Amino acid sequence: MSRKLKINIDRARVSSEEIMSKRNFESVLAQAKSAPQKPFYRSNRFLFSALIIALLAAALLWTFSGTKEEEQAHTYPEVKEGTMTVKPDTEILPQSETEHVQQEIVTKDSIQPVKKNKTHAAFAGIKPGIPFTIYKINTSDTSSFTHKNGSVIEIPAMAFRTKKGKKAVSGNVEIHYREFRDAYDILIAGITMKYDSAGSTHQLRSAGMMEMRGYQNGEELEIIPGKAIRVKLATTIADPDYNVYKLNETTNRWKYVGRDSVSGGVNTFAREPFFNRDGTDDPGAPIKPVLPKQKNTQKKNFKLLVEPSSPWAMYNGMYFEIDEHQYTFNSSFYNIAWDKVNLKPSEDSTHYLFLFEKNGVFKKGFGEKGMSLTVEAYPVFDKGDSSTVMSLYRKQLKVREEYDKKIKEEQRNALNDQFRSYQLHGANTELIYRMFSIEGFGIWNCDKIYRLAQKQTINLSITDLTGVKLSIGSLHIINKNIRSVYYYDVEHGGYSSITIDPTAPNVFFAVTENGDIIYLSSRDFAALNLGQPTVQIRMKIRKNDFKDADALRVFLMEL
Amino acid sequence: MTQSSSPFHVSVETIEQELVVIEAARKDPEKFRPLYEKYHEPIFRYVYQRSDDKEAAFDITQQVFVKALTHLHKYTFKGVPFSSWLYRIAKSEVFQAIADNKVNRTLNIDTPGLKEFMQESGTDESLLQKEKSLSICMGELPEADLQVVEMRFFESRAFKEIGEVLEITENNAKVKLYRILDRLKKCILLNV
């Protein structure tokens, strides 16, 4: 949301002499001595004792509650509408926090359940998962299909047999196909990116990953040996230094299969960016009107008079009241015959931001020629005479709401094809094929071992926003610049000490037993002080009410 | 560009000397005087950079030191100069004053800083002709991001200093800044 910000250009510098003349240490001393002392109930000693007693009581309750606790393990605190402020007890804050340090506002999406998991199931991805696309082919002849992102799958005739009876099948079969084209897909699907080789564990980085299954009448099929399926996996990565791996789904380990080959330049995608279409940034969007108020005679206002040809002619003759927080307003405004006016609503739609200009405003630098004035104001009406102004408001609001609805619908419809393709190819990027053959259904991956560009090992303390430690089964970290996911779980060394690239846009994830998402965004990561002996990671939670994988994916990508 | 006297590039020896002073001041507040005299001007400039009323800025500066002295028993050394703690107090005092309508949140820009900003953000000078676009785009930045831009371009602080004030690493400060510049550039293009 936009804030009121006054901008001064080249303000006169205050001299050191003047500053020095204002020094008054005696006054500081006197005020510090007379500062009110904390009452006993707010003293560190009292709060610390209370904390210890509360912890002991909680431990006793936990010990004797047994089954009851397990029954309640899935019950989260009720989340109420609106916002609430949760502030850790003063004693939990770092000592350098002072009374006025801004408190964290916890919204509906980020209220933390305080919960301890006793057992941790293996991570199985996040629901809703990446959907399969089903292709129906006839096995009597060679066939192929092109996936929506451009990947091509070429299947020889009579390539399948039943898994149980090993009997070759003819006629129509269903091929279930999906791709995991970036770290978000890999995370959602819960696919490991660890690779064990010669006793060492490495991190894989993907250039393209796919999963394919075959079915006939609901019965699972397998590929007949010697009837290899040709995969041309669409990607943007042309680096030839990648291998092909197949996931052993029993051991959850990648197995090296061989090398792929790369071909490029077969297709050109030209797409317009999908994001930033929220209406507010679209210059063609109808205006989001500001709710008019009754005129306050104590406040300054102005009447807008514009030519009929002006884009703001609908406001002609209407009064606008200067926002009481207006900081740049100068009464000389009334004496100037402005030759141009522009306006746009503030993000919170509480006022319009008017820009009045005269003589073309500025040519070079600031204030050399012409003039301009920014005025924050909202429409007003005289007492008992609101009909015209309110009628315009309601009309504009209706147009805007219809537009917003249409845009949302368009975004929704476009998600499956345009968005995914745009993410994959970018604008005007040539499509690259990574080509290899497969002789078995399952998950296949073009990978290479990834090593961190910069390394820093940090000790973590994972807490909720209130500072309470969270016990999570596995921690997942995405570096938004690469297609990989780092997994740390309690069964394999835990996550109390991890090595990451401190300069990368890292996002931390975990999933609760209920499937809700606990996260630390890349923005919050960038704000961490990684130099501390133990870095406190304050995770937020987002209820997992995503309708489909795309909605979930959009949420993850924005972190 | 603002010539703020930077207290940051201090030696380990100086930091240790400050710790000795702090320890003494905990027992006898009068001993805090050298730190007050050393940091009064930088703290004032920090406060005044973000506000529009000089007298109010002097008052806020005094209040910062009152708070510092009152809470000195809570101060713990975290490997960064003592001034980073003072800046944190100053930051919260400024925001409190803004919340209380004592001062307006202000961005003070000087021409050399602006030129540097334009160069680093890759923004064409002609796009920045209007106060409007700057006002809108800077106004849309989250406060933490605005602080980074301010400190880098309009207070001439090194990334190390920015990191110390904001309690993030030097590298994180760099990464943060370039992400912010990207966003600002897009915003300015949209608001020309």
Image (cartoon, coloured by chain):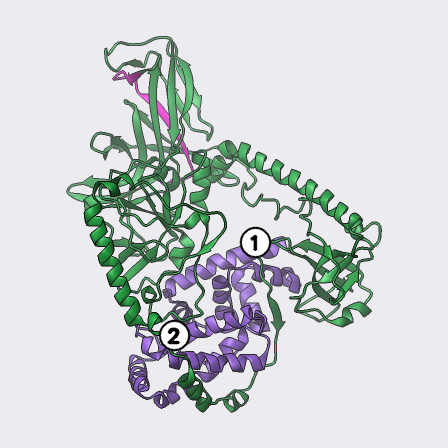
Chain colours: A green, B purple
Q: Which residue is mark 2?
A: B85
Q: Quadrant of residue B167?
A: bottom left
Q: Chain of mark 1?
A: B
Asked whether residue A225 is drawn in magenta, I would say yes
Question: What residue is drawn where x is 30% and y is 16%?
Answer: A221
Q: Quadrant of residue A320?
A: bottom right
**Residue A493 seen from this side:** no
Question: What residue is drawn where x is 31% and y is 86%?
Answer: B21
Of labels 1 and 2, earlier in sequence is 2
**Residue A200 seen from this side:** yes
- Above or below, A155 against A326 in this view is above
- Above or below, A531 against A83 in this view is below
Instruction: Tell which of A24 and A182 is nearer to you.
Output: A24
Residue A77 in the figure: left or right of residue A267: left
Residue A253 in the figure: left or right of residue A547: left
- Which amino acid, by three-letter code, is at mark 1? Lys
Q: Which residue is mark 1?
A: B186
Question: What residue is drawn where x is 62% and y is 72%?
Answer: A8
- Which amino acid, by three-letter code, is at mark 2? Trp
Label 2 SS: helix
